[in-house]
Image (cartoon, rainbow, N blue to C red):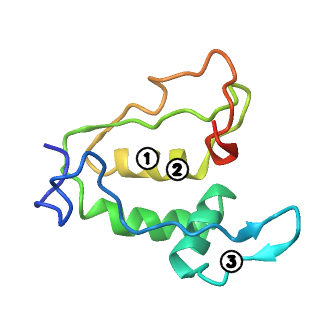
Amino acid sequence: MVFVKDTENEDQNVWYLSEYRPYWNSKHMRVKNPDFDEFSGEVLGLKQNKPESVNQFFDIINSLVHKGIVICVVPSHDPDSSVSGITLVAQRLARNDRFNGTECLHRKYAVQKLADGG
C-alpha cells in the first residue's frame, strides 16, 4: 500500500491532490485562464524546478506516503531532458526512509508531449 490512509477518491484509478488549471486559455492568442489558481501556480513552479514549489509538494506528499516503499517517476517525454521538479520531490521523499527508484525508468525515444495533446 502506498498511501498512509484511505483517500477521498480511492474508488478512482488515479489519486490526485487537486485539479490543475492551465495558465493560458489560448497561448497563441495570449488569453489567460481566469480559473488559474494558487495550486496550478505551484505546479508550474514545480515544472520550473523552483525550490519553494519542490518544498511545498514534498511537505504535502511526505505525510501521505508510507515509509519503506520505492519512489519512482515517469520520465519526461524527452529522453535528453534534465532532472525535473517532480524528480527532485521524489528523491527527497526517498531520503526520508523510502527507496530511491528515480533512476529505474528511462525514456529511450522521444514521444509527443502530453501537454501538447500526446
The part of the image, by quadrant, that contains residue 16 is bottom left
Residue 26 screen position, x and y as percent: 78, 66
N-terminal of the two: label 3 or label 1? Answer: 3
Asked whether the residues under the numbered discs 1 and 2 touch, taking CB atoms below 8 Å apart as contact, a structural biologist would say yes
Instruction: Give the labeled residue for mark 2.
Output: 86
Instruction: Give the labeled residue for mark 1.
Output: 90
Q: Which residue is the extreme one toward the top?
A: 108
Instruction: Give the labeled residue for mark 3.
Output: 33
Residue 17 screen position, x and y as percent: 36, 65
Q: CA distance from mark 3 to mark 1?
A: 29 Å
Q: Is residue 103 left or right of residue 117?
A: left
Badge 3 marks a residue whose secondary structure is: loop
Instruction: Please determine whether, in this image, residue 31 is positioned above or below residue 47.
Output: below
- Amino acid bearing label 2: Ile
Residue at the spot 59% in from the left edge and 60% down from the top edge: 46
The quadrant of the rendering that contains the C terminus is top right
Residue at the spot 72% in from the left edge and 69% down from the top edge: 25
Q: Is residue 16 left or right of residue 50?
A: left
The part of the image, by quadrant, that contains residue 52 is bottom right
The part of the image, by quadrant, that contains residue 100 is top left
Q: Is residue 28 left or right of residue 85?
A: right
Give the class, few, some or many, for how many residues have Cα within 10 Å of label 3's Cα (few <14, many ≥20).
some
Residue at the spot 88% in from the left edge and 68% down from the top edge: 29
